[in-house]
Image (cartoon, rainbow, N blue to C red):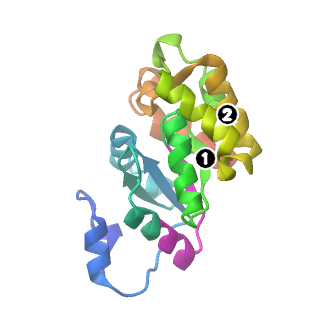
Amino acid sequence: MVDCANARGREVTLSDVDSSGGDMTSNAEYIILVVGSYGAYFRLTKDEVDRRFPCIIVYTPDPVPEEDTISFVRKMKEELDLPVLAIAESSPRSVKNFSLFVAGGCDIKWLGLRPSDVVALKMHPRCMRPMNSKDFKLAQRLLEKDAVVKQRPEWVEELKKMVETRSKVEVEALAPLGRSFLSNVYFPDKMVAQDWI
């Protein structure tokens, strides 16, 4: 058994958990899936958001989540009966990654960062990066052909906003609003409002 609550100060890897065997138990109420943004993962864990909002924080690197990661998150979701809320940059690649999790049997909700957040927070245009042709083509393909995305109207609307602005925004772009803005303002506000799609 791996006691993640007592593993503070060190990361618990997938191999640590897989080798331990046994059933999963937790007092958490959510699984927070951080996709491709180590900076966001670091800030959330350093500021111990799991103490304020009982959650398990899982990090998976970009560009494509591995099957083992998808299976593990799905297993946690099923065994612990917890919702999975995803945090990633506002980009077509993130939406594609979310789609891969859902297609792999792990239904997730998109917590952020979303284009509508960028507008609501009045983020400076310098925080945005232009989408390249590959990003734009991926966004179009997701809108036209991805069955998972097409079943989620809110995801479609957010993707359309990306296409309209032709921009993407990293989670780290929240830092100019305050070093701990992500963990002390953005994340708590989202959790209290249950603002995920």
Q: Which residue is under mark 1?
A: 110
Is residue 27 in sight in this rendering? no
Instruction: Residue 12: give x, y in percent of width and height.
Output: 28, 64
Residue at label 2? 158
First to last magenta residue range: 73-87
Mark nearer the N terminus (1 vs 2): 1
- Residue 79 left/right relative to 21: right
Q: Are marks 1 and 2 in contact (CB under 8 Å)?
A: yes
Q: Residue at x 41, y 54 (%)?
A: 65
At label 2, which amino acid type do we have?
Answer: Glu
Which mark, by number, is residue 76?
Answer: none
Q: Eyeballing the image, is 121 above or below 196?
A: above
Q: Going 43% across and 86% down the picture, which residue do you hit? A: 23
Residue 132, image x, y percentages: 47, 21
Mark 1 to mark 2 CA distance (whole Å): 10 Å
Look at the image and say whether residue 75 sits in the magenta stretch: yes
Query: Where's the N terminus, which quadrant?
Result: bottom left
Q: Residue at x 33, y 44 (%)?
A: 42
Q: Mark 1 belongs to which amino acid? A: Trp
